[in-house]
Amino acid sequence: MTSGAGGAARPATARLVMWTLAAGQFLMALDSSVMNVSIAAVADDVGTTVTGIQGAITAYTLVMAMFMIPGGKVGALIGRRRAFVIGCCIYGCGSLTTALAPDLPVLLLGWSVLEGIGAALILPAIVALVATNFSVERRAAAYGLVAAAGAVAIALGPLIGGFATTYLSWRWVFAAEVLVVLGILVLARRISDAASRGPTRVDLVGSVLSALGLGTFVYGVLRSGEWGWARPKPDAPAWLGLSPVMWLMLAGLLLVWCFLYWEARVVERKGEPLVDPALLRSRQLRGGLTMFFFQYLVMMGVFFAVPLYLSVALGLSALATGARLLPLSLTLLAAATLIPRFLPDVSPRLTVRLGLLALLVGTVALTTALDTGAGAEIVTLPLLLVGTGMGALASQLGSVTVSAVPEEQSAEVGGIQNAVTNLGSSIGTALAGSVLITVLASSFLTSIEQNPALPAEVKQRTAVELQNGVTFLSDAQLKAALDASGTDEEVARAAMDANAAARLDGLRAALMILAFASVLALFFTSSIPTRQPRQP
């Protein structure tokens, strides 16, 4: 390991630094998944609705997306370790505020605003600090562990949240985060830092344009489930006959283009850009960022669709759902850390391609495994493949992107990299969810219409109900609704069978879309280098 000053550190210190940064990444990713199984409990506790808590989750994602690139620039100006420490302090204050929140506004302040801003400072700094603290030969292993920590947090989030909500309180999760932050701050003294560039002007116009562009695009994607992608859903707003989602995404892309155009003008005037557009001319960097996008698109799509099916369709508890996902978490961690250790000279391009193929085979295998009841003995092998593929990508991509630019620009690369992963996560979740619900509704309606045992008025009423929106219902939820409406036994049985088949069709379609994304990503792997980066 080498410090920013060029000194060497003992292996014990290197491991301590690695685990400190991995703990920071774990915390940032944990909040994205830990509360999804506790939304109802949180809403009841703070006196709001489920929609209000979902809005808080959306706001957390938006704040991160908006401030990720400026957060990377802050690290370049004041020092990466200082940005990391300040971000941890802000994040810890947000966690404490959330743990004590008596109502929704305080929850929004702590969870969405403070934690989101803290994450926007921490995540780019982690990327830069790995580049500063580890030699080129060891960066792949360090980036693999850090990336694996984030992915494992996403996988274990429902398990942790379910356990806390069932046996303690959701507030204990955020209280524990404060303790973890304090531990990170104590250990952060061991982290070496490169010297900052010194006082300089901050590109305020670029900061505003990047925040508005990324925020607008991500907000549009996040509202796609409620508004629809192109055709507006019933009771959803419509702008010129189209869903607002399309207009928001278009406006976001236009603002991002304006941001890049402005940055080019700043460089021409010999100013200090927020992001140097010349960075994106690097073929290797573009390839690494593209792979990051597809990795998080597929990963978050899987982490949305599979737990939803396990918990709702099969009625498993949050603890049981998390246990079913453990094979994925273990192989992801193993692949991300062991590939760089035992195959230090392996081709990054070959590893990424094999990882994408493992993702492809795993997601396709899941489409058939879940059809047989999703028992632990059935889903383990597909999840092992998915986890191995994700881990293989994680073991290489961080080193690929950072090694494409000079070390002093690693903070800017960290901001761009995390903005891209945020986009991939948002699109993957929204895409998997919308495809699942659309196919579910279509399959359910087809099953009802083709059932000769159902009277015409029932079929007509079902079509009207589906036009007003459909949800992913468990058998227990549907049976309760049918009993409440006085539906006779034959009709209820037909509806239950149609719902079970439609859920499977929706999940298969969502997984096949993610498999298609894995194949599409293979077309962009030629930009990944064939040799591991080495120090001159």
Image: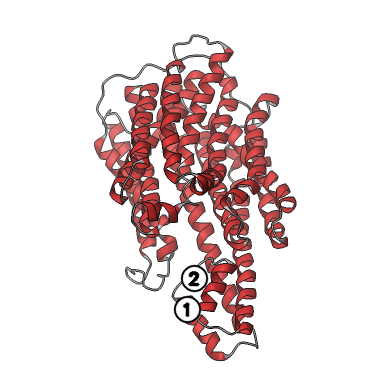
Q: CA distance from mark 1 to mark 2?
A: 8 Å
Q: Position of residue 452 (x, y in %)?
A: 65, 88
Amino acid type for the residue under numbered disc 1: Glu
Q: Nearer the viewer, residue 242 or 42?
A: 42
Above/below status of 475 relative to 459: above
In the displayed structure image, the side of residue 275 where residue 191 appears, left or right: right
Q: Which residue is mark 2?
A: 470
Q: Position of residue 466 (x, y in %)?
A: 49, 76
Q: Secondary structure at mark 2?
A: loop
Instruction: Name the residue carrying label 1.
Output: 465
Residue appearing at x 43%, y 53% in the figure: 41
Camera-side residue: 169 or 508? 169
Which amino acid type is shown beneath numbered disc 2?
A: Val
In the displayed image of the protein, which residue is found farthest to the right?
A: 377
Label ID, residue 296: none
Q: Residue 207: name its quadrant.
A: top left
Q: Is residue 291 above or below residue 395?
A: below
Q: Is residue 383 above or below residue 189?
A: below
Whether residues under marks 1 and 2 lie with C-beta atoms below 8 angstroms apart, the answer is: yes
Please report the residue visible at 52 percent of the width from the left and 81 percent of the height from the top. 462
